[in-house]
Amino acid sequence: QKAIEIHRAGRQLDYAQALGELGSTYFLQGDADRGLPAWQEALRIAGDAGLASEAVLWARNLAGAYAQRGDWDAAERYN
């Protein structure tokens, strides 16, 4: 979370990556409830900044996470 605070006012790419990695860490620890919002925010920032490859990465992670939970409608939104 410290990386997020550092990058918040900096380059949007760094900020999106820090959020996305935080989401991945939470998800890998089995805490999807905390990981999903971080990925959603990373996706929003990447999309707003025109960072298409970053947006695709976080959307793919979101789709996979929702599919793993059996939330097929949410998975479809991000796929």
Image (cartoon, rainbow, N blue to C red):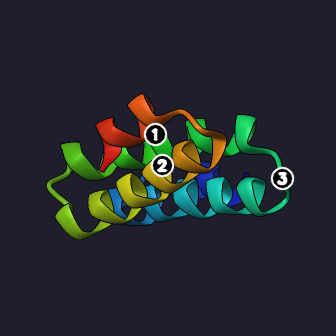
Q: Which residue is mark 3?
A: 30
- Quick one: SS at disc 2? helix
Q: Residue furthest right?
A: 29
Along the horizontal axis of the image, is 37 left or right of 53?
right
Along the horizontal axis of the image, is 4 left or right of 55?
right
Q: Are marks 2 and 3 in contact (CB under 8 Å)?
A: no
Q: Residue at the spot x=31%, y=36% of the render? A: 77
Q: Residue furthest bottom?
A: 53
Location of residue 6 by image quarter:
bottom right
Residue 7 is situated, as x and y percent measured from the top left of the image, at 51, 57
Q: Earlier in the sequence, mark 3 or mark 1?
A: 3
Location of residue 57 by image quarter:
bottom left
Q: Which residue is mark 1?
A: 41
Query: From mark 2 to mark 3, how far is it between C-alphas?
Result: 14 Å
Residue 62's tag is 2
Q: Residue at the spot x=45%, y=36% of the render? A: 72
Q: Earlier in the sequence, mark 2 or mark 1?
A: 1
Tell me if I can see residue 50 in this picture. Answer: yes
Residue 33 is situated, as x and y percent measured from the top left of the image, at 73, 34
Q: Residue furthest left?
A: 50
Give the residue type at disc 3. Gly
Vertical placement of residue 51 versus 26, above or below: below
Vertical placement of residue 18 versus 48, above or below: below
Query: From mark 2 to mark 1, how far is it between C-alphas?
Result: 11 Å
Along the horizontal axis of the image, is 73 left or right of 70?
left
- Quick one: SS at disc 3? loop
The local crowd at label 2, few if under 14, some if 14 to 19, many if 20 or more residues have their Cα within 10 Å, is many
The local crowd at label 3, few if under 14, some if 14 to 19, many if 20 or more residues have their Cα within 10 Å, is few
